[in-house]
Every structure is written in structure tokens, then in C-alpha cells.
Image (cartoon, rainbow, N blue to C red):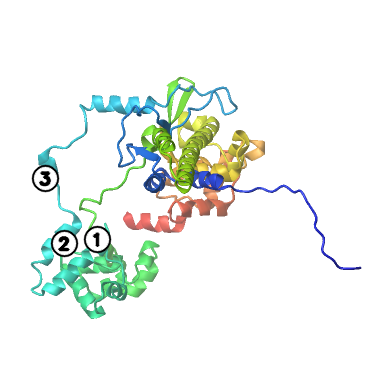
Amino acid sequence: MALGLRLDVRQSQSLVLTPQLQQAIRLLQLSNQELVGTLQSEVAENPFLELAETSVGVAAAKPERPEPGREPVLSPGPTASTGDSTGDWDQPRAPVALDQQLHSKRQASGGDDLRSLEERFSEAPSLRETLRRQLGMLSDDAELRKLAGDLTDWVDDEGYLREADTEIARRVGASIERVAEARGLLQRCEPTGIGARDLAECLALQLAERDRLDPAMRRLLDNLPLLARADWPALLRLCAVDREDLEGMVAELKALDPRPGHHFPAEPTTAILPDIVVFRTGPDHWRIELNSDALPRLVVDGAYYAELGKAGLELRHKEFVQERYQNATWLAKALDQRSRTILKVGQAIFARQRAFLADGPKALRPLVLRDIATATGLHESTVSRATNQKYAATPHGTFPLKYFFSTAIAGKDGAADHSAEVIRQKIKLMIQKEDPQAVLSDDQIVSRLGADGIVIARRTVAKYREAMGIASSMQRRRSKAMAR
């Protein structure tokens, strides 16, 4: 067969992600805080974009009513449509109910929740401030005091300095010996136990102050995992004491403070703002809205674009202006589509979790991404992005949207399936109510769940129990026996 060159024309279909589609996908999976940061970067580079002030912390404040010629595109987007397959929702014309609720709460509380000057000036100093004040009175070595002061920034809220001396020395540019001296100086501060590497060292510092750190107690501190498992025979053997002495030593440990730093005011935390809000409007009616306070408000400045169009710009400048304006409008559309998608997914979720809205977590139904994808006509990956780092405010609290997805556990004799989250709550409640004289084993929990029509394996019960941080029946039995 002869070889040769030939030119053929073929027609084929392929899926291409345009830059605009990639941008929409990226915005969808961002949390509100991350979205604000992304939009601020875009605004800094695009002269046709502006951010109005919202409660999520956008710097530029804009009037409520834009100037003539501007096209405001507000991120809350549309409200959920009525009459679709997601259920009979009672929907308003605009997402204003949350604003009205917050406004009424402010009026009921007598205005802004501002503390008096006396309250603000009488606040207790933080842990790090307290430590730095003490360091000035503990040593005459100014360089050592400064190094110990730097170490206070490494102390966590529980009072521990968990980093190794070698790592600290490498990062602060000091010798290991000097860092060890600074740690020792820090550990002389009150409350005793500050600056410890771990729990054993924290307790040892407190026992040493009480002159109770004898060899038997040291061996007990070296074997805290055995104490956590309530392995009394092993502890009696290692500590070389009798049962009465061991009980006394354990009682001494219980009197100590394992978190010496938790008495001080914690660092301020950022409250979670829900992306959607669900509340009751009637006996069988619920309303779902986007939380407009949590979403950034993007404004496209059409008037400025029109003004530049009349300025007779050079070709390259005109191309730059057109490209920036197109990017601004695409970003606004992507932001609006993000709001529509989150609202649509949230509506579909709560249409299937109505029992949760009425009765709480115990009524959660099994739900997977595929169910919401089928109901909304979206791809599963889109549903996953729309629920990633998104939160919903419900009558029972604020929950991540991922919380409402749970695998199904088969019911007994053809009964309805049960949500894995509901089963976890049942297991937790059983153990909380168990008789200290008759601690429930995993097999007994399986039997009780079976009586409720839930078919579950013992290893699954053990997996759920361990995930909730609940000890085994043997460890619980030993702990309760020691507590008596």
C-alpha cells in the first residue's frame, strides 16, 4: 500500500469550557468570604466594576439607588420560582424577609448592640498580654525576655506551646539552648502549666508546683493513654502502687487544669453567615430565601463605559475598554447565575427534608447528590459545588448544606430506609441514657436498632461510635466503675 499525504475534513462534537464558563464554575464553589476576596481583586483590575457595602465586609460603600445610566446587578438574584417540581414553597417577590427580621430584632433590642465604655475598658486582658506582663518581672536578661515574649505568639488558646524547640529555633533564628531557656521562663508564668508541649508536661508542671511529682506520679503521666482506656491492671503494675493509691493519684490529676489558657478571653471568631434562610410562614408553608446580607453586591458602571465610547479613543485603547466591559458583564451574569443555582439547589434539598424543618435532625431523610441533580436538572458536580461551604439557617439552627446529604441504611422487612445521621443520633442517645451498671455493647446497640426496624452491622455501629468520639463499651465500663 502506497503512503501519501491527504487532507480530510471531519466533523465532530466536543465539550469546550469557555473562560466565562470556567469563571462561573469557580465562583460557584467559593464561600461568601472567598467570593468577596475574589470580587475585590476583580474590582481592582476592572474600572467598570464596583462593590457596594454589605455585611460581609466590602470596603466601598455605594448609595442604595445608583446614578442614572448605571446597571445595578445585585448578587441575591431571583427568588425561587413557584410551581416547579421542588415543592410548594411560599415565595416572596423579593428577598427582603431576612432584612425585615433583623431590623425588627434591632428595634426590639433598643438599637445597635453597643457596649458601654465601662464594659469595654473593664475587659479582662488576653492570655498573651498577661504572659508578657509577667515576663518583665521574671528575668533581668532583656534578650531572654524578648525571646520569651516572642514565644507567647506561639501559645495556643489552651495555653500549650506545642512546637518543638528545634522548629522554633529554626524559625526565630536562635539556638536550641536559648529557646529552651525562653520556654522555661515562660513556664514560670501563671497560670501554671502554660507553655507545655503536651498534656503530660502541663500536668507535671502543676504537680511540681504542689510538690506532688513523685516517681509513681511520673510513671502515671508517662502512661496517660492507659489511663484514658481505664486499663487499671496495667497502671497498677507500672506505677507499683495499690488500688487505693492509684485512685488517689487519679483524683489528684482530675483536680488539675488540663487547659490553663481557656480561662482567658478567646480570640475573636468570625460568625458564619448563612447563604440561605428557611422559615415558616404558615402551618404547612415554608419560605426559602437567599440571605442578601451575606452576598456581595456588584455594580456594573454602564455610564462610564458610554462616556468612554464617546471620547474618540485609539483602537488599542478601545479594544481594552471593550474587553474590560465584557468581562464586567460576564462576571455580573456569573454572580447572578451563582445565586440562582444556590437557591435552586437549596429549594430542592428542603423540599425533600420537610420533615427536618418540622421535627429536627431526628427526621432527616436519606439524600444523595444524585437525587438533587435529578430534581434540578443539574450535574452532580454542579450540585456538589453549590453546596460546598454553603450554610442554611433553619428553625433548628444553622447547618452546612452538606449536612442534609446522608447515605441510606436499609429498613427491616421492606420498611423505609433510614438516614445515617439519624442512626448516629440514635446511637448517641442510647449511650447517653445507658445504665452505668449495664453498659451497652455494640451488639446490644445493633439489637436495639433492629427492634426499631433498622438493619445495621456491628462494624458500622463501631464506626459511627468512633466517629462521634465515644469510647468502647469496655472503656466506658471501666471509667464508670472508677468514678463510683
Residue at 44 percent across and 37 percent down: it is 309
Crowding at dot 2, Cα within 10 Å, few <14 / some 14-19 / many 20+, comes out as many
Q: Marks 1 and 2: which is nearer the front? A: 2
Furthest residue toward right? 1
Label 1 vs 2, first from the N-terminus: 2
Residue at 37 percent across and 28 percent down: it is 98
What residue does disc 2 label? Answer: 131
Q: Looking at this view, is 224 or 164 the one in front?
A: 164
- Tell me residue 266's x, y (percent): 24, 51
- Tell me residue 382's x, y (percent): 56, 43
Per the model, the C-alpha gap separating discs 1 and 2 is 10 Å
Q: Marks 3 and 2: which is nearer the front? A: 3
Q: Amino acid at mark 3?
A: Phe
Can residue 185 be seen in the rendering of this structure? yes
> The residue tagged with tag 2: helix, strand or loop?
helix
The numbered disc on residue 121 is 3
What residue does disc 1 label? Answer: 159
Q: CB of mark 1 within 8 Å of CB of mark 2?
A: no
Residue at 27 percent across and 75 percent down: it is 169
